[in-house]
Image (cartoon, helix red, strand yellow):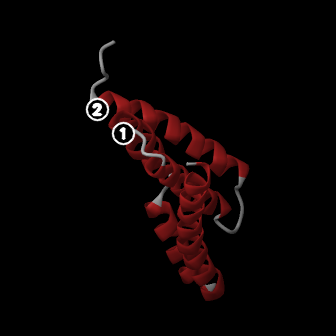
Amino acid sequence: MTALDPAHLVGMGGALGALCRAYVSQRFEGEYPVGTLAVNIIGSFALGLVTFVGAGEEVILLVGTGACGSFTTFSSFSFETVRLIEEDDLTAAAANALANLLGALAAIGLAWLLTRAVG
């Protein structure tokens, strides 16, 4: 079996991640950026999981760089936080920033704990 070129792996993962990102965004449309929060936490968990289980380079390229890279979104998180600040909703802006950071860190921690418990 011939190994896939790294660019193809990243591209296939990126296409999958972008489709999933669009789906989640549509499901969680609203005033507060819940969709972005959800993808950042889920993506952090997924990246942590494939990393901590010791996945091979091809899986890291496909899932980590490709899928998680296009699924999660730092730029949307930043934009939405600034938008909340511009709307003078400083409490929501601070909550959004903390929720994304702490949620992502907690998700990675959970992935680490799960891999240690199973492995």
Residue 115 x, y percent position in the rendering: 56, 52
Query: At 61% from the left edge and 49% from the top edge, which residue is drawn?
Result: 118
How far apart marks 2 and 1 lie (CA) works out to: 7 Å
The vertical placement of 23 against 107, above or below, is above
Residue 88 relative to residue 7: left or right: right
- Residue 100 image position (x, y, % from top left): 56, 70
Which is more toward the observer, 76 or 117? 117
Q: Quadrant of residue 45?
A: bottom right
Q: Is residue 36 left or right of residue 11?
A: right
Q: Quadrant of residue 13?
A: top left
Q: Nearer the viewer, residue 87 or 33?
A: 33
Classify mark 2: helix, strand or loop.
helix
Res. 61 mark:
1
Residue visible at 71% across and 55% down in the picture = 28
Q: Amino acid at mark 2?
A: Pro
Q: Which mark is residue 98?
A: none
Label 2 with label 1: CB-CB less than 8 Å:
yes
Q: Say which residue label 2 marks.
A: 6
Q: Residue at x 51, y 41 (%)?
A: 17
